[in-house]
Image (spheres, grey):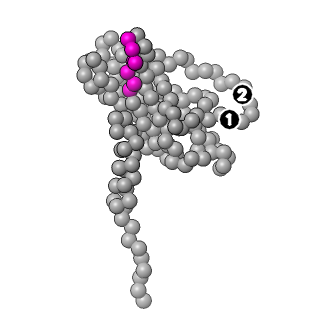
């Protein structure tokens, strides 16, 4: 009796996936979770005295799973970092919206306003933060809270 097992090459399947993920966000660090891959990048101000931001992109593993607009995603910068100052407005109180939940457009990044600290060391600085968000699957009928650590580079002039 012969065995007809098919060999599965983990390494051979993961290399193409890794190449695709790296191509999606070459200048941004990525956090991979069960339902989303998050990428974050520092966006410097477009003109003097304009606001800088951290752009976070949510890449869903399943197109049915979506990030909720309310409560809005939040970025908490690592308290040990001395490069950025958080400029997010206070979190909105949960309203009595009722009805169907609204979802973020996953093709657009979520922007979190920040400012460079006047005491930030010059040059490229790695900054960490945690993104907290809520997401749902309408098809499967569940909602969850998600958190992901992100790291990005800030070039301080």
Q: Would you call the spot at circle 1 few (<14 residues within 10 Å), some (14-19), or many (20 or more)? A: few
Q: Which residues are magenta?
A: 42-48
Horizontal side of 31 relative to 110 (left or right) equals left
**Residue 60: percent from left, percent from top:** 52, 44
From where the camera sits, is residue 86 visible? no
Considering every residue shown, the one lying at the far front of the view is: 47
Residue at (48% x, 26% y) in the render: 111
Identified at 47% across, 16% down, the residue is 87
Would you name the residue on which mark 2 appears? 97
Q: Quadrant of residue 145?
A: top right
Helix, strand or loop for disc 2: loop
Tags 2 and 1 touching, CB below 8 Å: yes
Mark number, residue 90 = none
Q: Quadrant of residue 90?
A: top right
Counting the numbered discs, the total is 2
**Quadrant that contains the N terminus:** bottom left
Measured from the top left, where is residue 10 in percent x and y?
A: 37, 61
**Dot 1: element:** loop
- Image position, residue 88 (x, y; %): 50, 19
State the residue at coordinates (33%, 59%).
Answer: 11
Q: Residue furthest left?
A: 123
Can residue 12 be seen here? The reply is yes
> Which mark is on residue 101?
1
Closest to the observer, 114 or 1: 114
Q: Residue drawn 37% across and 55% down?
A: 16
């Amino acid at each position: 009796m012969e065995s007809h097992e098919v060999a599965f090459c983990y390494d051979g399947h993961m290399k193409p996936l890794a190449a695709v993920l790296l191509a999606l966000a070459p200048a941004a660090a990525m956090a991979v979770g069960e339902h989303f891959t998050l990428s974050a990048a520092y966006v410097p101000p477009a003109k003097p005295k304009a606001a800088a931001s951290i752009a976070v992109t949510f890449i869903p593993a399943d197109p049915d799973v979506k990030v909720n607009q309310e409560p809005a995603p939040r970025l908490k910068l690592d308290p040990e970092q001395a490069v950025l100052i958080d400029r997010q407005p206070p979190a909105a109180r949960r309203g009595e919206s009722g009805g169907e939940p609204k979802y973020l457009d996953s093709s657009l990044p979520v922007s979190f306003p920040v400012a460079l600290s006047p005491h930030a060391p010059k040059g490229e600085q790695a900054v960490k933060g945690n993104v907290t968000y809520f997401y749902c699957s309408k098809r499967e009928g569940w909602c969850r809270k998600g958190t992901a650590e992100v790291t990005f580079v800030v070039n301080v002039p």
